[in-house]
Image (spheres, rainbow, N blue to C red):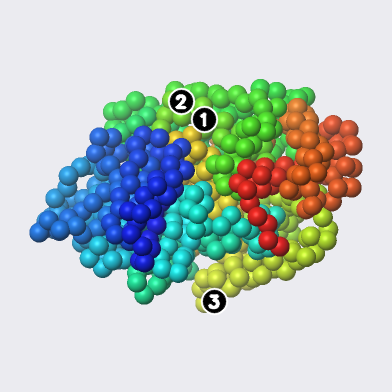
Amino acid sequence: MCGITGWLSYSQDMREHENVLQRMTDSMARRGPDAQGTWIDGPVGLGHRRLSIIDLEGGKQPMLARQADGKQAATITYSGEIYNFRELRAELQLRGHCFENRSDTEVVLRAYLEWGENFVDRLNGMYAFAIWDRRQESLLLVRDRMGVKPLYYYPTADGVIFGSEPKALLANPSVPRRVRADGLREILEMVKTPGHAVFHGMYEVLPGEVVRVDRRGLRKRRYWRLEAREHADSLEQTVRHTRDLLEDIVERQIVADVPLCSLLSGGLDSSVITALASKKLLEAGKANIRSFSVDFRDHGQGFAGDAVRGTPDAPFVRELVARIHSTHGEILLDSAELADPALRRQVVRALDLPPAYWGDMWPSLYRLFEEVRKHSTVALSGESADEVFGGYRWFHDPEAIEADTFPWLTSVTGKYFDGKTLFDRGLLRQLDMPAFLADSYHQAIAETPMLVGESPVERRMRELSYLNLTRFVQTLLDRKDRMSMAVGLEVRVPFCDHRLVEYAFNIPWSLKAFDGREKSILRAATRDLLPPSITDRVKSPYPSTQDPAYENALRHSLATIMQSQDAPVRPLLDTMHVQETLNRPLGDVSPMYDRMGMELAVGLNTWLTDLDVTLDL
């Protein structure tokens, strides 16, 4: 895993801007602490920061490939992992290609030279990369199918500026730090519009998209998207095929030349990945998987179930560890520290955005990954199983299913995703948030692929699945990527393997929830791996602190902001509502979503200040 960046300007010689390219590259030092490199050829400059995972000695980047006559052919700056690189390497060798190292990077570069732009159809993995083809004087930007790895770009009059994170682009003086109304809308709602970046003029390469830039301009092409297909397998065949896919996926994703671990919550998803990784490693004669879980030193009065989390994680974690005998470490976080302004600044700088909903999860993930990184460089995660197999409560809540909006903004869960509560009513009317939500939702619904003859129930559940797989999951993947890469940790997401996603997307809902439970297929496919208590456990999200010390520290940060006339977020807030919230007794921020309002207000102020952002509303 790494950080990539670059600048293409057909009217300039990049040798004159070598210092700018270096600043862009240096901005992502945390993504790649092991090595760095830049490469310039006429109008293009590429930068790379490396986190060494495969072929630690080889694989230095940017990487150059030459033709048989010795002339330069193409150069790549690459981030990610190709899980089928060994098969591709063998096929390319049969076609006459010679390799200088063992890295998957060289396989990607050689695959491009052999098959051209269509080589992306052969890749299995998580990746974002740029290839400069010197023969055609063109630049290719590519992102993996599910958007696990980020890639941003800023079109210019004569080329493009790109990078793994907005900070790399913002290090270039040609890219303004300006946010307009559409960008602020994206911050205030938990709705991520594919391809849109918050900064004006900046975009994301879509999941499964190729962006080509040459002297004629910029062109985009989707090489992968979800499709509706007939599902002919029986229930038994569906369960068996799901298990076969998971076995293959995990076997591919445990390959690393550095220490590997799993992130274990004691829930179904992370337990499945941890148990399968343990099984595969032991079958290969290797040491058992190392696992890590997270909890808080003090939950105040102790854990209490709420509308989102019914049970604590620790007892289930210990059950799985006792069964598979993984080498386990429990990481305990200090709740009050999570609201520390210095830590919040680290989170904002890693994200390049204000942390939105459930604000304590961002710093807690940061601290968790920081501790994990002391022992491992690669971690397996159970992220995305809920989107793939229908695990969230809103998949099973009639109100959410029938609502004419995003299901996670409805019913009992919706209030936890609303951070607008402390913002000025006039500002919200000016932004017309209901229209923004409606437009975003209906755009997503219009994209949803359908089968002719599907029943209304199956059609609606396919829509909900599509919304989760193209909108909701991207927010979680972005959070995971930024917080992990900020400490130099690679997190792999087996449930985002596109073969599994394609297959599960087309399992009819009547089969997907055949026993009336969430994630029925996944439970049935992995029941033999887990203790019954975990197999039958109700979904419980990543833990959020219940310690009043966190809320107290959060209140203090907001109060400090309100005392400063120069705080950039103040004009955006309803000061009377803010004061009413701060005057309530500790622990009486009710309804709970006022805490989300405090989170967003404090995070937005940090972002506007530290990144020197101009709001142009």
Residue 325 on image: x %, y %: 44, 23
Q: The residue tagged with tag 3: helix, strand or loop?
A: loop
- Seen as rendered, the residue at the extreme bottom is 452
Distance from label 3 to label 1 (Cα)?
Answer: 50 Å
Q: What's the mark number on residue 237?
A: none
Q: In this figure, which residue is indicated by the disc labeled 2?
A: 374
Tell me the crowding category of disc 2: few under 14, some 14 to 19, or many 20 or more residues within 10 angstroms, Cα based: few
| Residue at (89% x, 36% y) in the render | 584
Residue 512, image quadrant: bottom right
Residue type at tag 3: Gly
Q: The residue tagged with tag 2: helix, strand or loop?
A: loop
Q: In this figure, which residue is indicated by the disc labeled 1?
A: 370
In primary-sequence order, the first of circles 3 and 1 is 1
Position of residue 8 in the picture relative to residue 351 (left or right) = left
Q: Who is closer to the viewer here, 126 or 280?
A: 126
Residue type at tag 1: Glu
- Residue depth check, mark 3 versus mark 2: number of the one nearer the observer: 2
Tell me the crowding category of disc 3: few under 14, some 14 to 19, or many 20 or more residues within 10 angstroms, Cα based: few
Q: In this figure, which residue is indicated by the disc labeled 3?
A: 453
In primary-sequence order, the first of circles 3 and 2 is 2
Residue 436, image quadrant: bottom right
Task: Check the image and report above or below for 234 versus 319.
Answer: below
